[in-house]
Amino acid sequence: MFNEILLIDKNVYIMVALISSVILASILVKLVQVEILREDKPLIILIAIGLSLIALAVVIGVFANIAASDSIVYNILFYILLILGTTIMTIFIHKTLSNLIYQANYDLLTGIYNKNILFRILKNNILSAEKIDKPISIVFMDINNFKSVNDDFGHQAGDLILYRIAKEIKKHIRKSDVFIRYGGDEFILILPDTNKKNAEQISLRLGQEIDNLKINHKISLSLGVASFPEDAKLVEDLIDIADSRMYQHKLSVKNNIKKIL
């Protein structure tokens, strides 16, 4: 009876083969391409092992059907290899999708959120603030003289500055604050339950921390603050206002004016 249960039914084998073909053709090829581009050797080895086990299971299944063999050995090997291969493939898919989700939401250089998630997070924060009648502020940051560093010392030096500044700012913000790399040398800090006056004070303090940071280049921050609902109620407007004030501050920095606009 046990032998009959384990016997590879032809219809089951055909179904498994078709499902495997569809998966390998439509999903796995793309995921493998992603990992090859990322040069993630552990995951590439993992997919190779998984595919090899499934391929071996298929070969055994074909041999068993051609030979019309009802050997329990073939049946056990088929199911063991198929289960192992499928499990490994599932792990591979999970890890690859996790990597893709991380890359979609986080900046790989600094480890903080990236622009892709900014609007969703800021919109949710504004909706929450509106419900409890609390303010929320954002700080738009831009690194002064960053282009000169890239031009004079190369992008590796620029990347190090971005990393150092992001790391330093993370040390001086609350757990409830959200720090995002907006792009290039620009960052946005979301400050829940913070009015404009307090946000300006936080901006000044963060600017001073960066001024005191021991970097072998003349680096400082231009900062612009905007608050909900005082300045704007829409995400896009809030960002535009903070961006505009940051630019005004950048101009004032050239004239040695320290006030955050």
Image: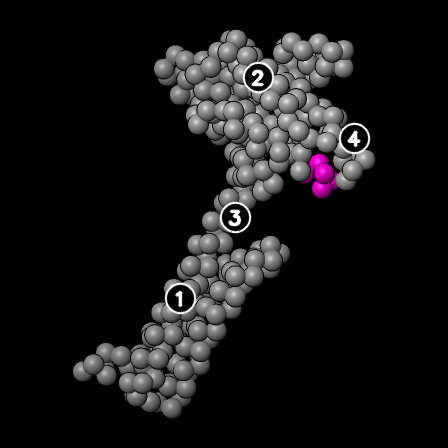
Q: Earlier in the sequence, mark 4 or mark 3?
A: 3
Residue type (three-letter) at the residue carrying disc 3: Leu
Mark 2 lies on residue: 205
Q: Secondary structure at mark 3?
A: helix
Whether residue 229 is visible here, answered yes or no, is no
Q: Earlier in the sequence, mark 4 or mark 1?
A: 1
Q: Secondary structure at mark 2?
A: helix
Mark 4 or mark 2, which is nearer to you? 2
Instruction: Compute the Cα span from label 4 to label 2.
Output: 25 Å
**What stretch of residues is rendered in magenta?**
155-159
Q: Earlier in the sequence, mark 4 or mark 2?
A: 4
Up-down relation of residue 84 to residue 93 (above or below)? below
**Residue 183 horizontal/vertical position (percent):** 64, 32
205 lies left or right of 254: left
Mark 4 lies on residue: 148
Q: Residue at x 55, y 44 (%)?
A: 103
Label of residue 130 in the image: none
- Which quadrant: the N terminus? bottom left
Q: Residues within 10 Å of mark 3 (few under 14, many from 20)?
A: some
**Residue 12 horizontal/vertical position (percent):** 33, 74
Q: Earlier in the sequence, mark 3 or mark 1?
A: 1
Q: Residues within 10 Å of mark 1 (few under 14, many from 20)?
A: some
Q: Residue at x 55, y 12 (%)?
A: 201
Mark 3 lies on residue: 100
Q: Earlier in the sequence, mark 1 or mark 2?
A: 1
